[in-house]
Image: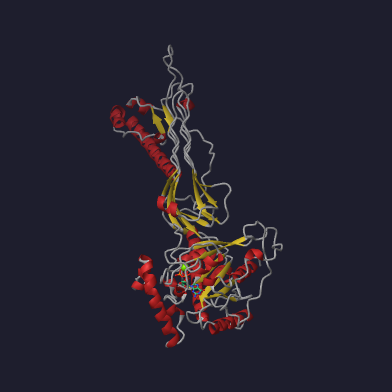
Amino acid sequence: MPPRYPSSSSIFLPFLYPSLFRSASRIKCRSTITTLHSSSPVPTPSETSTEPSSSSDALPYSRLNPPPDEYAITTFADKARITAHAGGGGHGCISFLREAFMADGPANGGDGGHGGNIYIQAVHGEASLHKLARRRILRAGRGKTGQGSSRGGARGDDVVIQVPVGTVVREISRIDPMVEENLRFREAREKEREYAKLVRESEAQASDAGDAGDAIRAELPEPPEHPNLHKFILYPGISHTERRNLTLPRLPRRERLYVQPEGPIHLDLSQPTVRPILLAAGGIGGLGNPHFVSKERPRPLFATKGERAVSMQLELELKLLADVGLVGLPNAGKSTLLRALTNSRARVGNWAFTTLQPNIGTVVLDNHKGRPVATPKPQPPAPHAVINDATYGSVVIAQHEQIAGPGPEPRTRFTVADIPGLIEGAHLDRGLGIEFLRHVERAGVLAFVIDLSAGDAVDALKALWTEVGLYARLRDDEETEREIGGRIDWEGDGSRSPGPGRTGYGGQMIVADLSGPADNSEMGGLHIAAKPWFVVATKGDLPSTEENYARLKEYLAAVTDGQEPHPSGVEGAWTEDCAAIPVSAIHGHGVDRIIHWTVGLLDE
Ligand SMILES: Nc1nc2c(ncn2[C@@H]2O[C@H](COP(=O)(O)OP(=O)(O)OP(=O)(O)O)[C@@H](O)[C@H]2O)c(=O)[nH]1
Ligand SMILES: [Mg+2]
């Protein structure tokens, strides 16, 4: 396998010694720029994108051009695999009233408490799965055992797994004691039947044999245990003979307060869940000995055990729910743009892969006044209007004219996700891979951040769309595979009960009706390519970026007119109004245009 990161020290050193690197990078960066401008032709994005390419080192430090060590660390995990054990029920109690002058008091054993349940709830305020990823095993409380004097056991504590909104929960496997129990019961009944047959046969032989019949009867093996014996707790002082002669009653039918959801569970928690969703129900508590009192059995020497509970392995995957997803090559300026748009303190550095995990920022449109600010969708600037001055971005958002926003709830803010950079071949696990694209998969709008100073912008855009398209196709294939997997059932292993319309063959794979596969309209990555998108042409303050921008503009106009295909090559993709907005994020120029354009696309 190729190394995950380039081994060059220029990539690693900054992470280790940012301050040392800063001075070194200035020299290196300057020399790179000189070579780019003097000798070489326009380099391709893949050649230059991972190299420091901007002149940001020459600029004084500011919020938008921070030193490499000025950033906020957020602990983040977007995947977690956990095992959740619901609580078992507490055992019932065998006890009798003891009082002065009452030698044989009535049975008064309390019932066991029910086991705790496992729930899941999506809440705002949680942003990562790292706590769950670290904990790995979650256990709900066990029900307490019942006690004498008819005192019932306490209920086990429930566990509510709180996850961020946007988490997808998939059940991988489950151990359901009820299924095991049923199998065991069936086996025990089978043994009982065989024994009864044996007894009948030996009886017949014994009666034929006359006097020798007793010897035949004595040869009979020990009778099998009662099929439900393991569900009872017997009085500790019970003798072996008492135990053998014990006639256990039928177990009473119990009402279940919580019904265990059928597996496999698949939840897409894209909305906050007001009431927690039940994943695994706790076992019900055992019954105390008073439940088995009858005329024939006034002093029952047994109670029932608490039920064992379900445990399941779950896979959690977080897909951040941002309104806008920033997609770009490494070092394109995504994090700087996020800082310019929001109050984020994402790490910025003049090297590739500064960002190693997604950052989310919120763009506040109303300046925290609670009143929406919305402006009509602006036209993108003219092709020649490449920013080299402070024309753009000089308008403070809160100073805009306030007009009523669209819809019943006008937009006052939106969120932006900045993900690690993509490189060509990311789908082959180059760079940091395409794993992080899942965080922009659900974004309403995609913003392709393209460094105008790093080679041909059109090529860079096509390369990015190719990777996004490949990712989308991979996801579609995964989804189809999962769906087919969900229709296959291994019968005879006791893991699942046969569904309607399925016939059971011991240990055979049964594929349920596959005639109607998943909706084909989503095939071929359209679910991402159908999203509205635009290009943020950044680093417009650097020299010689005008022509690059003009070419990009021309290309996008051709895509909008239908003369050029969508850069991903996906048929039916969104090409309504493909715009390129030139910005200089490091100076905060052009940022308000992005905000207005995005609001327009989001509210479309
Ligand atoms: N001149 C100039 N430099 C910029 C601009 N935007 C970003 N930069 C510089 O470009 C370099 C990379 O910026 P980042 O924001 O870290 O880029 P990124 O796309 O987040 O990079 P990765 O996280 O590695 O993918 C930094 O040195 C920034 O200061 C800009 O508009 N103009
Ligand atoms: Mg970054």
Q: Which image quarter: residue 22? A: bottom left
Examine the rendered structure and indicate whether residue 504 appears above or below residue 250: below
Query: How are the residues colored?
Result: secondary structure
Name the quarter where the C terminus is drawn. bottom right
Residue 565: percent from left, percent from top: 57, 80
Q: Nearer the viewer, residue 516 or 356?
A: 356
Q: Does the image show residue 4?
A: no
Name the quarter where the N terminus is drawn. bottom left
Examine the rendered structure and indicate whether residue 31 appears above or below residue 324: below
Q: Does the image show residue 72?
A: yes
**Residue farthest along the front direction in this orientation:** 60
Q: Report how many numbered discs are placed on residues in the image.
A: 0
Residue 559: percent from left, percent from top: 60, 80
Residue 340: percent from left, percent from top: 54, 67
Q: Nearer the viewer, residue 2 or 541?
A: 541
**Residue farthest along the right direction in this orientation:** 404
